[in-house]
Image: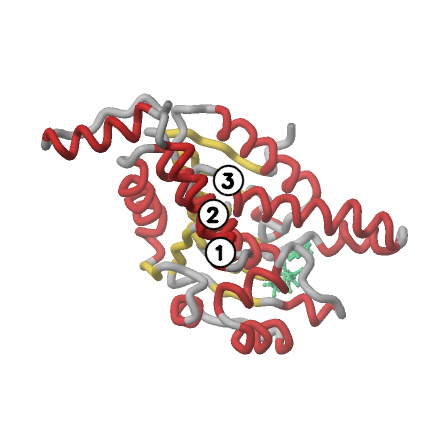
Amino acid sequence: MSDAVLLEIDDGIALVTFNRPDKLNALNYDLIDCLMAALDRIETDAAVRAVILTGAGERAFSAGADIHEFAGSVRRGRDTAVRDFVRRGQAMTARLEAFRKPVIAAVNGLAFGGGCEITEAVHLAIASERARFAKPEIDLGMPPTFGGTQRLPRLVGRKRALELLLTGDPFSPQRALEIGLVNRVVTHDVLLPAARELAARIVRHSPLAVGGIITAVTRGLNMGIGEGLQVESEQFAALVPTSDLGEDINAWIERRPPSYSGR
Ligand code: COA
């Protein structure tokens, strides 16, 4: 395993850092594979309750897919380009989106292309005042391929998304906040503390309830409301036999803090 992604676990929160600062944390295949491996590890570690994603160095969260590398896949033809580049990137954003522990992007700088698509896919995002976003794929003669044509319109609305996708123009963190791409903008020096504080406000709750809410919202958004209500009902039903649901209800009735077993 390379060091393209750093993983530090502290107080139940995993800090995952994209670590190619000299390349503005461009997402080469190795970095994507390392991120997936880190998520595998985090998923099975019950002590980890939330994930924060950020970028190493002073300039970038991530400048997007590694153009030098995927250009090689494109030169090898359609099947290789789709298999090595598109499927890998789509699998990464889909995994982040469906992850049952909350994933927070701490956007510390440039979030272009795939860096912006990661911000779209994760559950929550906080941007530094130094962040800068863009959908520059059109400058390369292509649509975004890590879910950007699908998630951004669902997140911010079709016309706002199309303006960003069709112009490729960079936009500010304040604009990202206005359109609902990020939850808040903070001064650069408090970015990670703000992400940790948000994570802490979530992980004080039952991990099973947190996972159920993430799954109901994420799946339901891509369905009609009837099917979405069914997903909501299934997520609740799955919690009914767990001791954590009983514990939360009893703690409320008995006016004491809950204590979770994660089962
Ligand atoms: N893929 C591969 N390498 C990248 C990259 C990317 N997406 N973005 C930046 N890099 C590399 C550059 O090649 C350069 O490496 P080098 O010093 O070995 O040549 C290094 O990161 C610094 O980037 P540079 O372009 O010199 O910085 P800049 O300040 O002049 O420009 C950007 C910053 C973000 C405007 C510019 O790097 C850029 O346009 N990147 C591509 C963004 C993009 O289109 N992403 C979507 C891809 S689908």
Question: Quick check: marks 1 and 2 in contact, CB under 8 Å?
Answer: yes
Instruction: Inspect the image, locate mark 3, and give the three-letter code of the amino acid beneath it.
Output: Phe
Q: Ligand 1: does it lie within 8 Å of the C-beta at label 3?
A: no
Q: Nearer the viewer, residue 28 or 78?
A: 78
Q: Nearer the viewer, residue 56 or 244?
A: 244
Give the distance between the C-alpha atoms of the residues marked 1 and 3, in whole angstroms. 23 Å
The image's colouring method is secondary structure
Residue 191 in the image: x percent, y percent?
35, 51
Residue 132 in the image: x percent, y percent?
49, 65
* Numbered disc 2: secondary structure: helix
Give the distance between the C-alpha atoms of the residues marked 1 and 2, in whole angstroms. 6 Å
Which of discs 1 and 3 lies nearer the camera? The answer is: 1
Quadrant hosting residue 166: bottom right
Residue 63 seen by the camera: yes
* Numbered disc 1: secondary structure: helix
Residue 95 in the image: x percent, y percent?
57, 42
Q: Nearer the viewer, residue 66 or 147?
A: 147
Please say if 47 is above or below 208.
above
